[in-house]
């Protein structure tokens, strides 16, 4: 009998001080629809692509604030344009326009300080 395995990430669930406001921020600035609350509403659907699952050492500085236990990385198609849109909305974004072997990256925090990395794959 073949071993069974997971086929992908079905959701990301985390605590928020103001969940409705934070869900609206993600919808407005990153285009992520909130969880449906009624019939006929559709959940956000992501494009197929690479998903990295990587535990980091407990003392990593990669996430920024040491109190944050997770960071989400979103794949994007046109990082430069998205960074411009976020900055136009007065959202602080650190953008490295240099192409790495993996692509280009930008960093920001949501309104509750959760770290977000945006990734335009090469």
Image (cartoon, rainbow, N blue to C red):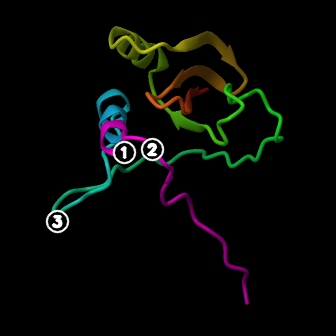
Q: How many labels does the image show?
A: 3
Q: Mark 1 points at which residue?
A: 19
Magenta part of the protein: which range?
1-22
Q: Nearer the viewer, residue 82 or 21?
A: 21
Q: Which residue is drawn at 61% across and 47% down?
A: 51
Residue 32 percent coordinates (x, y) = 35, 40
Q: Residues within 10 Å of mark 3 (few under 14, many from 20)?
A: few
Query: Mark on residue 39?
Result: 3
Q: Which of marks 1 and 3 is nearer the N terminus?
A: 1
Q: Residues within 10 Å of mark 1 (few under 14, many from 20)?
A: few
The stretch drawn in magenta includes residue 19: yes
Q: From the top left corner, tell me how far across and down residue 87 is, in percent.
A: 40, 10
Q: Earlier in the sequence, mark 2 or mark 3?
A: 2
Q: In this view, does 50 lie to the left or right of 10?
A: right
- Give the spatial CA distance, label 2 vs label 3: 25 Å
Q: Is 22 placed above or below 99 here?
A: below
Q: Is residue 89 above or below residue 21?
A: above
> Residue 71 versus residue 2: which sits nearer the camera?
71
Residue drawn at (64%, 42%) of the image? 70
Q: Which of the 4 quarters of the picture holds residue 103?
A: top right
Residue hosting label 2: 16
């Amino acid at each position: 009998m073949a071993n069974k395995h997971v086929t992908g990430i079905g959701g990301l669930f985390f605590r928020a001080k103001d969940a409705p406001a934070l869900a609206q921020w993600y919808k407005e600035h990153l285009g992520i629809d909130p969880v449906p609350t009624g019939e006929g509403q559709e959940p956000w659907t992501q494009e197929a692509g690479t998903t990295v699952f990587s535990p980091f050492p407990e003392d990593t500085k990669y996430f920024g604030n040491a109190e944050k236990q997770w960071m989400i990385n979103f794949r994007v198609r046109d990082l430069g344009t998205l960074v411009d849109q976020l900055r136009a909305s007065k959202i602080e974004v650190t953008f490295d326009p240099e192409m790495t072997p993996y692509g280009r990256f930008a960093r920001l925090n949501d309104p509750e300080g959760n770290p977000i990395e945006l990734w335009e794959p090469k």
